[in-house]
């Protein structure tokens, strides 16, 4: 899929990438052939919800439930999903 | 020694396990040490698993299984399974020789994440000449199977004088094989490549053409195939940030258990390098004198010591500084600020603008030639000494 990400877009971590929590580094990392991206806290929280089942809107809802103090998260989430898609870390199942 | 006592040493992220130096190929640019024949007392399965466990406990997450040819190890499936249980992302770096569909499937079941296959050229004739065996068709078949079994696929081509002009054909072939990533790795002059440098150095014009073509293809195949073009550092004005700094993120263990901050560091003088058979990895990484020798900035001499770019390139490569100046604490002569830079440029120009001399034959990488290099065998013409110019006259 190309074009803007909508609330109904369903992101999933791309084939060939592996997301995992690294205790030694205290963060999520995205692993791929001979490389790794260290994710900051928010990026890790978003990416671990990109499971090919939840839509972008559901991910935002879920994050707002889990982090009630946070201001409106949707801009940040869409911005990160867009970056992640540009880097081919995620694809859209729908 | 480290520059400041307050910084705790960084953690290794990368473990390169050189499982064996045995290899059915004889590539004359191999980065294995010339004295590889002395590393024959290989770590056992249990010893490797202990190394994996200790590295993982320190935070290493990327594991490269390499050699030599890692497929020579009969316990590769078992090593992959154990590393997978520990949570590594596992990369198999291979020639494909020694692989078949049965093993590709077994690796997948054991948890292997990625397979990188190296080719020597895009034509069967040149590939087989450089590899020293008839491997080209088998490699093609293995590449197809890697895709069929749904691994991400990296194809690696080491570039030098004799295949640099084929970059377009190489990338067309990689695209046809549906590679996800292609590494165009310019020969780095260590080990066997240093011995064969005059035969391998491309001309400046060749390098410029290859670079332009690689960039065209990067544009053209954006989103389909990622192309990494490693700039040949001999033709640069600033050194590479080798290993992201000594003892910074990278840890190599050689077949006999010798632990190294990079796979070429074994050739450096005055260092003995600890062995995993004698010490645990945490001590080796954090406390051993050799891993601290060039860590940080305190060891630097001028022009590096006062250079504001030292945090970017760490003074370049210690092995290259040693090979080209005799002192591993000197600035890497690739840097235009090095007093040895002009001499390197002169030698590069000389070597790369001339036809390789007929009297300097290429020395293929094999155990017999390794023993000759170590002075164990009588000198004489190196085993399998042939000139690359003979490649087309078979």
Image: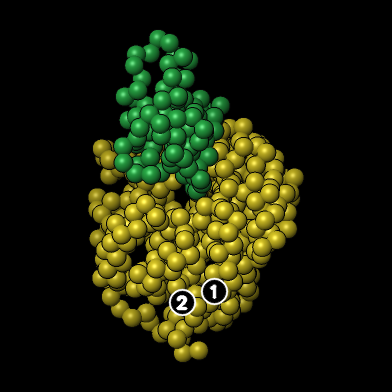
In the picture, the disc for residue B123 is 2
User: Number of callouts in the render?
Assistant: 2
Q: Residues within 10 Å of mark 1 (few under 14, many from 20)?
A: many
Subunit that carries the residue with mark 2: B
Subunit that carries the residue with mark 1: B
Going 38% across and 29% down the picture, which residue do you hit?
A7
Q: CA distance from mark 1 to mark 2?
A: 8 Å
Residue B220 falls in image quadrant: bottom left
Q: Residues within 10 Å of mark 2 (few under 14, many from 20)?
A: some
Colour chain A is painted in: green
Going 44% across and 55% down the picture, which residue do you hit?
B181
> Marks 2 and 1: in contact by CB < 8 Å?
yes
Q: Position of residue B222 (x, y in %)?
A: 34, 54
Image quarter of the N terminus of chain B:
top left
Q: Earlier in the sequence, mark 1 or mark 2?
A: 2
Using the rendered image of the protein, determine whether residue B166 is visible from the camera's viewpoint. yes
Colour chain B is painted in: yellow
Q: Position of residue B372 (x, y in %)?
A: 59, 72
Of residues B76 and B314, the one drawn nearer to the viewer in this rendering: B76
Of residues A31 and B185, the one drawn nearer to the viewer in this rendering: A31
Using the rendered image of the protein, determine whether residue B10 is visible from the camera's viewpoint. no
Q: Position of residue A35 (x, y in %)?
A: 47, 44
Say which residue label 1 marks: B136
Q: Position of residue B64 (x, y in %)?
A: 56, 49
């Amino acid at each position: 899929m190309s074009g803007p990400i909508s609330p109904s877009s369903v992101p999933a971590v791309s084939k060939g990438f592996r997301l995992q929590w690294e205790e030694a580094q205290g963060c999520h990392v995205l692993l791929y052939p001979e490389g790794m991206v260290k994710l900051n806290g928010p990026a890790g929280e978003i990416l671990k919800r990109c499971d090919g089942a939840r839509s972008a809107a559901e991910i935002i809802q879920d994050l707002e439930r889990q982090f009630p103090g946070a201001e409106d998260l949707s801009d940040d989430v869409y911005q990160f999903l867009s970056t992640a898609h540009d880097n081919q870390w995620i694809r859209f199942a729908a | 020694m480290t520059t400041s006592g307050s910084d705790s040493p960084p953690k290794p992220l990368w473990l390169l396990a050189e499982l064996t130096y045995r290899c059915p190929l004889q590539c004359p640019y191999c980065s294995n040490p010339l004295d590889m024949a002395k590393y024959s007392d290989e770590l056992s399965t249990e010893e490797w698993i202990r190394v994996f466990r200790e590295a993982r406990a320190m935070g290493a997450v990327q594991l490269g299984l390499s050699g030599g040819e890692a497929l020579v190890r009969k316990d590769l499936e078992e090593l992959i399974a154990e590393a997978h249980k520990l949570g590594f992302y596992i990369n198999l770096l291979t020639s494909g020789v020694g692989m078949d569909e049965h093993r590709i499937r077994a690796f997948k079941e054991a948890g292997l994440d990625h397979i990188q296959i190296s080719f020597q050229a895009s034509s069967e004739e040149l590939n087989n000449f450089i590899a020293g065996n008839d491997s080209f068709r088998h490699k093609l078949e293995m590449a197809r199977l890697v895709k069929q079994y749904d691994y991400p696929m990296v194809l690696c081509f080491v570039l030098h004088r004799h295949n640099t002009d084929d970059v377009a054909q190489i990338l067309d072939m990689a695209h046809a094989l549906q590679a996800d990533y292609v590494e165009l790795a310019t020969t780095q002059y260590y080990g066997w490549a240093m011995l064969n440098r005059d035969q391998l150095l491309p001309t400046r014009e060749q390098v410029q053409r290859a670079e332009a073509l690689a960039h065209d293809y990067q544009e053209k195949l954006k989103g389909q195939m990622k192309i990494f073009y490693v700039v040949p550092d001999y033709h640069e004005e600033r050194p590479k940030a080798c290993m992201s700094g000594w003892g910074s993120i990278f840890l190599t263990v050689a077949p006999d258990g010798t632990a190294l901050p990079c796979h070429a560091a074994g050739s450096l003088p005055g260092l003995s390098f600890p062995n995993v058979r004698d010490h645990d990895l945490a001590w080796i990484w954090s406390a051993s004198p050799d891993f601290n020798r060039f860590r940080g900035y305190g060891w630097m001499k001028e022009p590096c010591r006062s250079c504001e770019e030292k945090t970017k390139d760490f003074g370049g490569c210690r092995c290259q500084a040693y090979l080209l100046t005799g002192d591993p604490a000197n600035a890497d002569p690739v840097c235009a600020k090095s007093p040895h830079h002009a001499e390197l440029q002169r030698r590069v120009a000389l070597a790369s603008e001339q036809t390789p001399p007929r009297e300097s034959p290429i020395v293929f990488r094999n155990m017999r030639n390794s023993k000759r290099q170590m002075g164990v065998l009588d000198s004489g013409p190196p085993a399998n000494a042939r000139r690359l110019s003979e490649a087309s006259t078979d």
